[in-house]
Image (cartoon, helix red, strand yellow):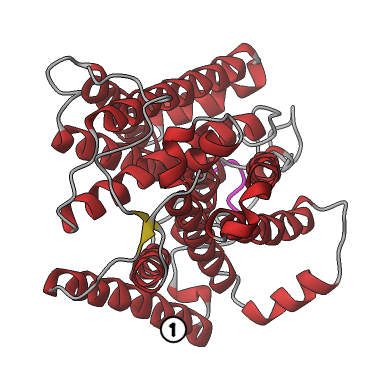
């Protein structure tokens, strides 16, 4: 099916204002990275116990969301729903931009970004980190090839195959990202086979929420209303993904509660963990799951575009809270180097670790978001990623709006 695509004009004051804000955020992130590189990580809130801080929260969130941002393109090519085809190029662009932003934060948070060359030239395939270098670069290459088959009419015949390859690879990528934590047996909260599939489900909700925010912003900015039936379909899809993510969280914690050795950890995360407990109940479950489900499924709010934006924002905020609890909360719980024994020393053994992120860490993480947004905004102006019309889609795969 031939699809008419267009570029964003990008001549309005609003466009340049958003561009300036995103450029400022990206610049602040680079300045923060340089500051931490110059002064050392002593100026951050990280320490010997908590070595992954706020930058990792943003980086992992962006990488996981990059996989989910490809949802719409995958639905169009892999599952044959032609109604989504006009939105597939924007979906693929978001996947590339989010992955680039996340990897930039990840690389700049290493302390020695130049050592990335070592990771790219010498592989230890017993390390999940080495596998992720292959998974990230492979995903980027496959999505670029997928975009080429969508936007070059001579290559349209290969779009389904490229889409299938990108779909399979995104599952591998998100499984690999979750397995970074699942394979770390030194951290009591991490070592679980659920981490891989759980991160896949997270990616579905995070990526679709971000896609909806960008799509609705483009619709409003270009004064082209989005088709009500398509909005209803995407609304229901987001509700399903959010519910699935909440289900996996429930299974994960019930599994931990089944084992006596995990009771202390679960008590810490769910009852007495301070900021971690608050972020779990209020951020991850309240803001990231319950509120979106109410807004997306309630007859009074599910047809409202403003409520859809609010629900998508809540999913993003809840996702960041989820990553904070998963990454930092799990490091805050003391290591059990000798299970079954009580350890006492002067090196904070058995003590819950504290962490207070510094301003450079926040700026670096937010800078990754700014970089992803900057890539999207410039690409929309330079290349034709947007469908010519947002109020008309092929009727064969779009249900009626309710």
Task: Please tell me whether residue 216 is drawn above or below residue 360 in the rendered image.
Answer: above
Task: Please tell me whether residue 247 is drawn above or below residue 230 in the rendered image.
Answer: above
Q: Which residues are magenta?
A: 347-352
Q: Secondary structure at mark 1?
A: helix
The image shows residue 172 at horizontal and vertical percentages of 70, 42
Q: Is residue 246 left or right of residue 389?
A: right
Residue shown at the point (38%, 62%) measured from the top left: 369
User: Quadrant where the C terminus lies?
Assistant: top left
Q: Main secondary structure of the magenta part?
A: loop
Residue 289 in view: yes
Q: Which residue is situated farthest in the bottom direction here?
A: 38
Task: Please tell me whether residue 27 is drawn above or below residue 138 in the rendered image.
Answer: below
- Asked if the magenta segment contains residue 18, the reply would be no
The image shows residue 145 at horizontal and vertical percentages of 65, 59
Residue shown at the point (20%, 16%) measured from the top left: 298
Q: Residues within 10 Å of mark 1 (few under 14, many from 20)?
A: some
- In this figure, which residue is indicated by the disc labeled 1? 35
Q: Is residue 102 left or right of residue 148?
A: left
Residue 51 in view: no
- Give residue 304's quadrant in the image: top left
Task: Please tell me whether residue 75 is drawn above or below residue 109 in the rendered image.
Answer: above
């Amino acid at each position: 099916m031939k699809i008419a695509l267009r570029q964003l004009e990008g001549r309005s004051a609003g466009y340049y204002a958003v561009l300036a804000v995103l450029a400022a955020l990206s610049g602040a992130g680079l300045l923060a990275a340089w500051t931490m590189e110059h002064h050392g990580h002593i100026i951050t809130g990280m320490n010997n116990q908590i070595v992954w801080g706020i930058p990792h929260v943003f980086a992992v969130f962006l990488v996981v969301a990059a996989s989910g941002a490809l949802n719409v393109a995958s639905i169009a090519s892999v599952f044959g729903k032609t109604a989504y085809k006009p939105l597939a190029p924007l979906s693929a662009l978001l996947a590339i931009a989010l992955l680039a932003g996340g990897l930039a934060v990840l690389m700049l948070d290493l302390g020695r970004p130049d050592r990335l060359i070592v990771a790219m030239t010498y592989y230890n395939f017993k390390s999940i980190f080495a596998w992720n270098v292959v998974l990230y670069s492979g995903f980027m290459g496959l999505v670029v090839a997928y975009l080429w088959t969508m936007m070059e009419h001579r290559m349209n015949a290969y779009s389904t195959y490229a889409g299938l390859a990108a779909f399979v690879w995104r599952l591998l990528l998100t499984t690999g990202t979750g397995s970074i934590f699942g394979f770390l047996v030194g951290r009591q909260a991490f070592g679980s086979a659920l981490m891989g599939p759980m991160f896949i489900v997270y990616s579905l909700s995070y990526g679709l929420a971000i896609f909806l925010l960008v799509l609705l912003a483009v619709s409003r900015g270009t004064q082209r209303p989005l088709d009500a039936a398509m909005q209803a379909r995407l609304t229901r899809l987001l509700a399903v993904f959010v519910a699935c993510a909440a289900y996996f969280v429930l299974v994960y914690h019930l599994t931990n509660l089944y084992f006596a050795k995990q009771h202390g950890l679960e008590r810490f995360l769910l009852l007495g963990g301070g900021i971690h407990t608050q972020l779990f109940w209020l951020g991850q479950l309240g803001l990231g799951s319950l509120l979106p489900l109410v807004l997306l499924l309630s007859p009074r709010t599910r047809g409202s575009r403003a409520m859809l934006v609010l629900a998508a924002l809540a999913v993003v905020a809840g996702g960041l809270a989820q990553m904070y609890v998963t990454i930092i909360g799990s490091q805050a719980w003391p290591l059990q180097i000798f299970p079954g024994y009580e350890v006492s020393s002067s090196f904070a053994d058995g003590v819950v670790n504290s962490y207070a992120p510094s301003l450079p860490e926040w700026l670096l993480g937010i800078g990754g978001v700014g970089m992803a947004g900057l890539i999207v905004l410039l690409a929309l102006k330079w290349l034709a990623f947007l469908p010519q019309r947002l109020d008309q889609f092929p009727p064969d795969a779009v249900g009626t709006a309710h």
